[in-house]
Image (cartoon, rainbow, N blue to C red):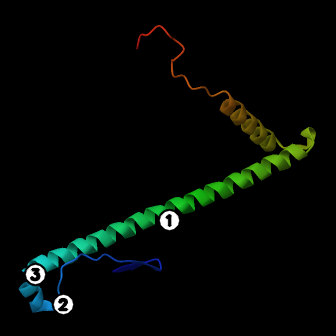
Amino acid sequence: MRSFDYCHFSVTLAASSTEGAEIIEKTGLLPEEVDDLRKVAARLADKAVDQYKVKKANESRLTEESRSRRWYLEDIERIKEKDEERRTPEEQAKLKLHQDERWEAHRSFDYEDDWRDDGTDD
């Protein structure tokens, strides 16, 4: 079992046993083999923690991007509400960039080259 960030990651590998010497008797496993199982379980728990860290980092990044995008759009709306002659050069540039991005996004095409119907593959 490994704890990280208030979460617990537990790995159980089966080896029917109860206590130390009985492990060797009942299962035929040597102490080295039991230790190897313990190491495998520890590595699996470490891998689970690493995957959890990646997931949390991605969630945090997505949340931050969403928040930044919301603030950006609110800023664009604020600029649009101003009279054109009252906008600063920075605001005009930001609005122009936003309009250019929207225009570029709408003119994206999927060129799959399937317009040719002569049966040839290039």
Residue located beneath label 2 in the image: 18
Judge left or right: residue 65 versus residue 103: left
Q: Which residue is mark 3?
A: 27
Q: How many angstroms separate mark 3 from mark 2 (CA)?
A: 10 Å
Of the two numbered discs 1 and 2 on the same chain, state the one appearing first in sequence: 2
From mark 1 to mark 3, how far is it between C-alphas? 40 Å
The answer, for residue 122, to whether it is visible in the render is: no
Disc 1: CA contacts within 10 A as few (<14), some (14-19) or many (>=20): few
Q: Residue at x 72, y 54 (%)?
A: 70
Q: Find residue 26 and report its image quarter.
A: bottom left
26, 30: nearer the viewer: 26
Q: Residues within 10 Å of mark 3 (few under 14, many from 20)?
A: few
Q: Nearer the viewer, residue 30 or 86?
A: 30
Secondary structure category for the residue under label 1: helix
Q: Which amino acid type is marked by label 1?
A: Lys
Q: Report whether 43 appears left or right of 16.
A: right
38 relative to 22, above or below: above
Q: CA distance from mark 1 to mark 2?
A: 38 Å
What x and y, as percent, mark residue 107?
67, 27
